[in-house]
Amino acid sequence: MSDLDARQYAPATERNREPILEILLEVLPPTGTVLEVSSGTGEHAIFFAPRIYPRKWLPSDPNPMARASIMAWREYAPAENLYPAIALNACDPMWTVEQQSLDIVAIVNINMIHIAPWSACLGLFAGARRILPSGGILYLYGPFKQGGQHTAASNAAFDESLRTQNPEWGVRNLEDVVEVAKTNNFSLIKTVAMPANNLSVIFQKMN
């Protein structure tokens, strides 16, 4: 089996990558490294990296099969500013990147916190607090409840499906995520409505 056969596909990527890129180009610092936490297939990484140049893109995932897919996509569509994938679990008390000099100025996290235990959201913000500089950006994308209510029937059905698979999963309440952000010294900059009843949620580290 060739390395390229390790490529995985996420159909939603082609639908959301352009709108996400538009927001990223607005909010990312002009230089530095963007750490993608939970990169999944790697399709976002190969799409975003050449388009955010001169910034660098660092993909990561805790799943070895996902990292193999990321690396296969990187071989298929190389970009000089796309790092090899690293192993990173948002729940870990220390991330491997904390021991390296990578000038990480932003963290991007797409479609993770609802397909993971709540501890992954807590770990994501704790890690972001540790490694991002003052003014650093944390970008989240996915479905959210607002005021404890689903914003669309499709999100309610998706939430039920997730909780059936794992009771620790589920669409998160935006206000709960904002509260976690505050406790980790992040402020909510803005939310942007996105395709398929998703949101872009942008936080900035205060100091």
Image (cartoon, helix red, strand yellow):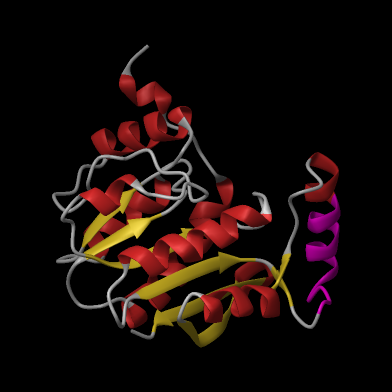
98 and 79: which is toward the camera: 98
Q: Percent x, y for residue 137? A: 37, 75
14 and 127: which is toward the camera: 127
Left or right, 202 with reference to 99: right
Q: Is residue 69 above or below residue 35?
A: above
Magenta span: 148-160
Is residue 163 at least partly visible in the picture? yes
Residue name at image x 78 percent, y 64 percent: 155
Q: Percent x, y for residue 68? A: 38, 29
Q: Percent x, y for residue 83? A: 22, 46
Provide the major secondary structure of the magenta segment: helix
64 and 90: which is toward the camera: 90
| Residue 153 on the magenta segment | yes
Q: Residue 4 falls in which quadrant of the image?
A: top left
Q: Percent x, y for residue 197? A: 69, 71
Q: Residue 51 falls in which quadrant of the image?
A: bottom left
| Residue 19 on the magenta segment | no
Is residue 111 at least partly visible in the picture? no
Residue name at image x 82 percent, y 49 percent: 163
